[in-house]
Image (tube, helix red, strand yellow):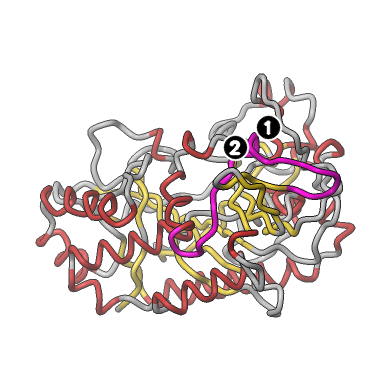
Amino acid sequence: MVSKYRTQFNKEFSQEKYQKTNELIIEKCGQEAAFRLSESPIFLTNDFWNKLDDASQSIITQIKNMSDEELSKAIPANCKVPNDTKKPHFLAIDFGICQDENGEIIPQLIELQAFPSLFGFQRLFEEVITEVYPFLTDLKKSLSQDEFVEKLKAVIVGDENPENVILLEIYPEKQKTAVDFVLTEQLLGIKTVCLTKVKKEGKKLFYEKDGELIPINRIYNRVIFDELDKIEGLETEFDFREDVDVEWITHPNWFFKVSKHILPKLKHAFVPKSYFLSDFPNNETLENFVLKPLFSFAGSGVNLNPTQEIIDQIDDKENYILQRKVIYAPLFEDINGEFSKAEIRLLFGWDPKKENPELLVNLVRMTKAAMVNVDFNKKDAIWIGSSMAFFGN
């Protein structure tokens, strides 16, 4: 979208530099990313940033104005966790980079979640990509490294001793996001612990370190709670639904409370109209909508072309939404003259002591397929995968 930066990047690009980017990530954190990194960042205008910011701030204000009673309706009865908090610690807002009927490039809200994402990895990716392509340094508008760590630490560690704070995941070494766990450990001095390794004594939780049981006071939660039931043979001493003496960062209930469940309630020029499937009006045309399950990640269960026959077969219609289709704009030219589409995720941290969340990093997913998830792309495609955005004129 900013042609001078695109031209310069494509001129400087080489396969060797892409390899160098991947090698530097391994060098700096000790392991490679288990997901595909795009060869290129994307370049967006400051005007587009202003649109993103306006939409995001409006969405945040609307969420703050929703009552806890209203938000809590989203939590499945079998997933309610005690000791909820007044606000989440994280917010991820995903926008498609689209084109309206007048040809103007606009953001369109795709989904949102009060759940953490790749804070540590995206920070490293920015550092590495600007090292490989030094001209990008002039486009950096992000926090300094010290400011970033300070703000992330305020949200996740707070006033606790880092030894008593854990990053909790189920089988963390098997997760595609494992590289982010390693980086979070390095940045914050906390330990990643598998849910199966958590010990429970009364209402207290512990993890083992060098043969000693260490009390857990805070949990930086990366477990998607409702997926635990799908894991066969899972045995744990601790069930999320138990009343225990820990502080959740962020509380598991927020995964449901701020999710696709609130999309039908949000209003803004850059928020496509959504309906609960059970409330879809007769005067709307089904072919103009995408069918989405309320609680799913990475595009699973999404149907781009739902039919009445498909909808009639769904019994739990309250667990699905229909969202008006948006047109992702093929804007990002590769070295072969082909174009990718993209989605940008704004990653906010919300210090409990502050009135509003703060943007810490952005994450971009590039694609040449109908869906943005990397898994849907051709294996030999380029300019696809995980990346980030720079803004300028």
Which quadrant holds residue 169? top right
Q: Earlier in the sequence, mark 1 or mark 2?
A: 2
Q: Please check the rendered image and state whether residue 192 is part of the magenta-colored stretch, yes or no.
A: yes
Badge 2 amino acid: Ile
Q: Kindly tell me whether residue 98 is visible in this rendering.
A: no
Q: Residue furthest front?
A: 211
Q: Which mark is residue 151?
A: none
Q: Quadrant of the C terminus?
A: bottom left
Residues in magenta, as a range: 186-205
Q: Quadrant of the N terminus?
A: bottom left
Q: Position of residue 150 (x, y in %)?
A: 51, 76
- As rendered, which of 23 and 138 lies closer to the eye? 23
Q: Position of residue 127 (x, y in %)?
A: 30, 66
Label 2 packing within 10 angstroms: few (<14), some (14-19), many (20+) = many
What residue sits right under mark 1 in the picture? 228
Vertical position of residue 175 compared to residue 311: above or below: below
CA gap between label 1 and label 2 equals 8 Å
Q: Please check the rendered image and state whether residue 312 is part of the magenta-colored stretch, yes or no.
A: no
Give the SS element for disc 1. Answer: helix
What residue sits right under mark 2 in the picture? 170
Q: Position of residue 85 (x, y in %)?
A: 80, 62
* Residue at left offset 73%, top offset 46%: 275
* Residue at left offset 50%, top offset 62%: 189
Vertical position of residue 261 compared to residue 134: above or below: above
* Residue at left offset 73%, top offset 20%: 313
Q: Do the numbered discs 1 and 2 sit on residues whose CB atoms are within 8 Å?
A: yes
* Residue at left offset 48%, top offset 58%: 184
